[in-house]
Image: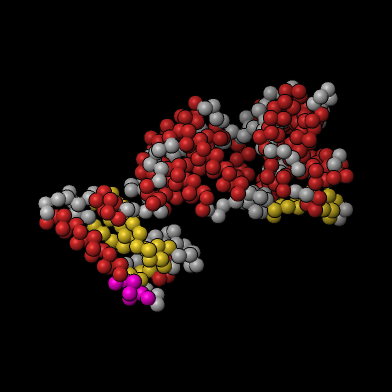
Amino acid sequence: MKKIRFRLFFNKKKAFCKNKLEEVKIEAVQNSKSIHFSTNVYLYSHQWEESTSEIINHPNGETLNRFLQEELIKLEWKELQYWKQGKSFSLKDIDDMLGTCNEEKLSFTEFCKEYISKSNKKESTKNNLMTTVKILESFSYEKQINNIDYNFMVEFENFLQCKNYKVNTITKHIKHIKSFYMEAVTRNLIISSDDNVYHYKTRNDKYKYSFLIPEELEKLENVNLDNGYYRLQHSLDAFLFCCYTGLRYSDFRSLNADSIVRIDNNEWIVFKSVKTNVDTRLPLYLLFQGKASAILDKYRRDINSFFRIKANSSVDKDLIMIKKLSGINTHISFHTARHTNATLLIYKGVNITTVQKLLGHKSIKTTQHYIDILPEGIINDLKRGFAK
């Protein structure tokens, strides 16, 4: 068995913040495999010199450097004792003696949970990531971090397909798995990282947007919700409002009476996107002949009640019933409203950079997805719809 190579390790890639302490660890490498374990020495990134593996610019630098070197000597001495007795000395022996970082002993799902709980992501993003973890638990709960490879990704995608998840949903969960994996790589918990995991693409990695053409939108506008279906009216109004404004569900829920302002006697919505933190202004009087304002008129006595909509999943169930009552066949969810807004604006001839601003996209590339999603037949349908 090859000799173990010991070295001090400080992850500067992770310690990108000058005000964040990171731990110096000892790395043990043997046969292209490695483990890391704690020294309980914490530094700022500017206090570590990579070329010499020494602490610098620290008031106790000399003492700490001596301590770290003594830790390395202890390990090398222990290995030498094994060799003198004719015994092999492996990474497992070190692990048994000292214990590696607790993170390395977690299952992949446990690591994902730990990563989510300690991250500074928004609560909505954390909930979204946890949805993936729950699915991952039902797929393979005991999978260890170092067993995540290309084959795992293929099997996980097959699992999602067997559960009848839609293409967009599968792509979202695959993206989350890759982000978990790369975090483990960054922490050096992956012994031998597999680039094929990071670059993995689903078999149909291109998003398939669902959207409504003008005729379908008109059917929803005129659907009859009498005879016991009036309870669906709020969900329908919210959905149509977002078709005319392009709002996400989270942004719609974040609005209140103060978000509706008048500029030069015209009605606007002014808000900051929950997802992207982008300031957005929407001129309601210019979008779709002011239809969004007409919906607001129904709720003028209590505008806030309009934006207090029920859970997204419950609204989606209402929309399934509304779709049946209106006689349209297109699959819709609440997010279909946003896709409908963007698609109709683009094919009405609105400049794509204007659409980008209206949607609050940080990157024009996100908006450009809408340009290539329609076959020629539907383009003609759109043109006829706008010609009315």
**From the viewer's perspective, is 121 left or right of 48?**
right
Q: Position of residue 219 (x, y in %)?
A: 78, 27
Give the residue at x 34% y 62%: 39
**From the viewer's perspective, is 28 left or right of 364?**
left
Residue 217, image quadrant: top right
Give the residue at x 84% y 55%: 263
User: Which residues lie in the magenta part?
Assistant: 60-66
Q: Is 63 one of the magenta-colored residues?
A: yes
Q: Position of residue 208 (x, y in %)?
A: 59, 33
Q: How many marks?
A: 0
* Figure colour scheme: secondary structure
Q: Position of residue 249 (x, y in %)?
A: 69, 42
**From the viewer's perspective, is 348 left or right of 62?**
right
The residue lying furthest to the front in this view is 97
The correct choice, above or below, for 202 with respect to 286 in the image is above
Give the residue at x 21% y 61%: 76
Q: Position of residue 77 (x, y in %)?
A: 19, 62
Q: Nearer the viewer, residue 212 or 6?
A: 6
Could you tell me which quadrant the C terminus lies in? Answer: top right
Q: Nearer the viewer, residue 163 or 42?
A: 42
Q: Nearer the viewer, residue 163 or 208?
A: 163
Q: Main secondary structure of the magenta part?
A: helix
Give the residue at x 54% y 27%: 164
The correct choice, above or below, for 307 with respect to 155 in the image is below
The residue lying furthest to the bottom in this view is 59
Q: Nearer the viewer, residue 334 or 369?
A: 334
Q: Is residue 203 visible?
A: no
**From the viewer's perspective, is 123 left or right of 290?**
left
Q: Is residue 143 visible?
A: yes
Q: Is 22 one of the magenta-colored residues?
A: no
